[in-house]
Image (cartoon, rainbow, N blue to C red):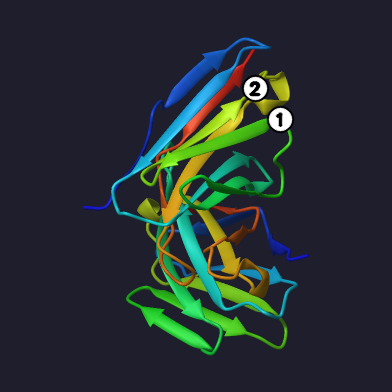
Amino acid sequence: DVKVTQSSRYLVKRTGEKVFLECVQDMDHENMFWYRQDPGLGLRLIYFSYDVKMKEKGDIPEGYSVSREKKERFSLILESASTNQTSMYLCASTFSTGYEQYFGPGTRLTVT
Amino acid sequence: GEDVEQSLFLSVREGDSSVINCTYTDSSSTYLYWYKQEPGAGLQLLTYIFSNMDMKQDQRLTVLLNKKDKHLSLRIADTQTGDSAIYFCAGVFGSSGNTGKLIFGQGTTLQVKP
């Protein structure tokens, strides 16, 4: 059974804290993605990675960075969390274009 | 750039058919997907259609693609209360290359009344 796991389901952080969200996939996928989901806006792509140590900005990269040191792991970093980063964060992975994109269960982050 | 649009809400009675609509702007779409998100869960792929197809049927699900109007629809026959969820339309467009990058619509919340 294929699996994408995320380190936390719920997270509460204070403004200004550095936040790490971890994602691990066990399918040997090349491509991994971080999205944020907000009501009425759908999923918006923050960053994606198509290989180890490779990354590309998505549509809303400001305030975020990413790290991919190993193929199976893709981390999203909020350098200095702000209240407007309160959201649901979803990680996904896929082999390539045309293949199913598998999603993790999501991390609901609240920044107070 | 690419844009994918959906209406935000649909309410139907149990047993009726549901039709969820999606429009997109980029004619270079290659693959179009429907994902389902149940409360508190991630997204699950329901079905997909290649851009060279007009229709795909999979049990209670029928996907129709009108390339001329850039319109995609998902029909759920005999809708059940367990179908209540958010449904996302998503597409791979020419600029995505081989990255698998998807562009998502806003999601349609389907409410099924008993």
Taking the spot 69% from the left edge, 46% from the top edge, the residue there is A41
Q: Chain of mark 1?
A: A
| Residue at 71% from the left image edge and 88% from the top image edge | B68
Residue A22: x %, y % from top left: 44, 31
Residue at label 2? A79
Q: CA distance from mark 1 to mark 2?
A: 7 Å
Q: Nearer the viewer, residue B6 or B28?
A: B28
Rendered location of residue A31, percent (x, y):
47, 55
Residue B58 shown left or right of residue A109 in the figure: left
Q: From the top left corner, tell me how far across and down residue B98 is, in percent.
A: 53, 69
Q: Amino acid at mark 1?
A: Gly
Q: Which residue is mark 1?
A: A63
Residues indicated by labels 1 and 2 sit on the same polypeptide chain: yes
Task: Compare residues B89 and A52 and report the one nearer the observer.
Answer: A52
Q: Secondary structure at mark 2?
A: loop
Local crowd at mark 2 within 10 Å, few (<14), some, or many (≥20)? Answer: some
Q: Label 2: chain?
A: A
Figure check: A71 above or below B2: above
Which kind of residue does numbered mark 2 sit on?
Glu
Q: Residue at x 71, y 49 (%)?
A: A59
Q: Is residue A51 visible?
A: yes
Comparing A80 with A14, the one in front is A80
Disc sitting over residue A93 in the figure: none
Asked whether disc 1 touches disc 2, contact meaning CB atoms under 8 Å apart, the reply is: yes
Q: Residue furthest right?
A: B1
Q: Residue at x 32, y 76 (%)?
A: B59
x and y percentages locating residue A89 in the rendered image: 54, 36
The secondary element bearing badge 1 is classed as loop
